[in-house]
Image (cartoon, rainbow, N blue to C red):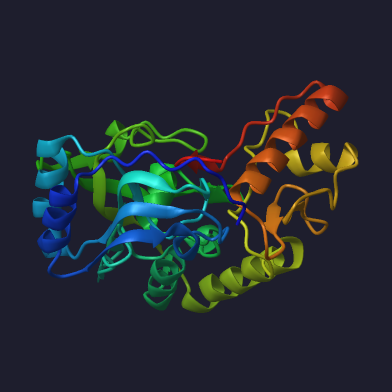
């Protein structure tokens, strides 16, 4: 990683750090946890306080954060995320230990940290259709819901019946689907601090063999067309109306274009990949250069789908 004299601006006192660490009994907590190990891009500096709460830890952790005004962010599997090289001041709350999944007829309840791939397999094993197109997205159900992730014409919001959350002040809430304001890569939770704890999904009964065959077909298509052999944050840019981001980038001659260890994928120009030695700064610089060149060539301004957070060098 590049070096700099500048230091991250910390946000948590030593006494509050100790209090947060002691509040986690069912999960994991640590200080200065490298976020490169918790993001699919495999870059990013340390979180000042990192917490993977178990279900029994949520209320206490939330109370400490709320009462002391500690800034925090919530992550799932770390896809669609770019963390700055200096890391994240405050707390990072990961939902990865919240992963219970239950099936009741054509309804599935899933904790927010359950991986989409796992929930999709459970649905298929139960002869439930509706998640085939989502099965290859490398994220948690909570993260997918927050940004209304989608693929092959299907969006997460299409199958959501209700969502359970914990507000910053510790109140438990349940939202019905018509309260969730789903749109392209957004939901009512996109700009909220509420912690999604679980999701009710409603699916359709189908033929197990056909469902699994469709999943295999789409996942093979994903492997054939996307650079899954390299770390990435997933699709880097939102789809501009009337265009395809990857095609605009390729038409600008940027296939294989590099900044440090970050590279526009030659397999799919809509992805920026980590060749193994990228920094978050490399990735952010490359994103900005791609946006500038495409705008210059086509007049279209690409919008990053990747969420950039933390402090950059």
Looking at this view, is 146 or 311 the one in front? 311
In the image, is residue 22 above or below residue 144?
Answer: below
Task: Identify which residue is drawn at 59% across, 49% down.
Answer: 280
Residue 3 place in picture, x, y as percent? 58, 51
Quarter of the figure with residue 237: top right
Task: Identify which residue is drawn at 88% across, 36% down.
Answer: 252
Task: Identify which residue is drawn at 67% across, 47% down.
Answer: 282
The single residue placed furthest to the top in the displayed view is: 299
Task: Judge left or right: residue 69 versus residue 252.
Answer: left
In the image, is residue 297 above or below residue 78?
Answer: above
Quarter of the figure with residue 227: bottom right
Q: Is residue 244 visible?
A: no
In the image, is residue 84 above or below residue 111?
Answer: above
Task: Judge left or right: residue 136 versus residue 126.
Answer: right
Looking at this view, is 108 or 111 the one in front? 111
Q: Is residue 238 visible?
A: yes
Task: Judge left or right: residue 131 versus residue 224.
Answer: left
In which quadrant will I find the N terminus?
bottom right
In which quadrant will I find the C terminus?
top right
Residue 189 place in picture, x, y as percent? 33, 36
Task: Judge left or right: residue 305 versus residue 55.
Answer: right
Task: Identify which residue is drawn at 53% across, 75% down.
Answer: 212
Looking at this view, is 40 or 192 the one in front? 40
Residue 231 place in picture, x, y as percent? 63, 63
Please state the total of marks drawn on the protein image.
Answer: 0
Residue 96 place in picture, x, y as percent? 33, 64
Looking at this view, is 283 or 223 the one in front? 283
């Amino acid at each position: 990683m590049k070096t700099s004299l500048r230091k991250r601006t910390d946000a948590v006192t030593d006494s509050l750090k100790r209090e947060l660490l002691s509040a986690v009994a069912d999960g994991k907590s640590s200080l200065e946890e490298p976020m490169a190990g918790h993001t699919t891009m495999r870059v990013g500096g340390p979180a000042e306080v990192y917490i993977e709460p178990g279900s029994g830890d949520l209320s206490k952790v939330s109370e400490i954060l709320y009462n002391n005004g500690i800034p925090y962010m919530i992550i799932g599997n770390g896809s669609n995320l770019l963390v700055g090289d200096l890391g994240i001041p405050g707390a990072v709350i990961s939902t990865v230990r919240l992963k219970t999944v239950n099936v009741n007829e054509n309804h599935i309840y899933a904790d927010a940290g359950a991986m989409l791939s796992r929930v999709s397999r459970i649905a298929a094993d139960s002869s439930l259709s509706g998640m085939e197109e989502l099965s290859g997205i490398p994220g948690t159900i909570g993260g997918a819901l927050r940004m209304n992730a989608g693929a092959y014409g299907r969006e997460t919001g299409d199958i959501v019946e209700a969502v359970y959350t914990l507000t910053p002040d510790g109140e438990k809430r349940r939202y019905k689907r018509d309260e969730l304001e789903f749109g392209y890569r957004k939901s009512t939770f996109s700009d909220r601090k509420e912690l999604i704890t679980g999701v009710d999904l409603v699916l359709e009964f189908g033929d197990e063999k056909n469902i699994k065959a469709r999943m295999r077909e789409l996942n093979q298509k994903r492997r054939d067309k996307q650079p899954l052999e390299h770390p990435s944050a997933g699709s880097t840019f939102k789809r501009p109306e009337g265009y395809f981001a990857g095609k605009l980038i390729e038409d600008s001659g940027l296939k294989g274009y590099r900044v440090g260890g970050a590279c526009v994928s030659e397999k799919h120009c809509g992805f920026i990949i980590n060749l193994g030695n990228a920094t978050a700064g490399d990735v952010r610089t490359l994103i900005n250069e791609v946006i500038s060149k495409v705008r210059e060539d086509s007049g279209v301004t690409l919008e990053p789908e990747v969420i950039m957070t933390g402090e950059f060098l």
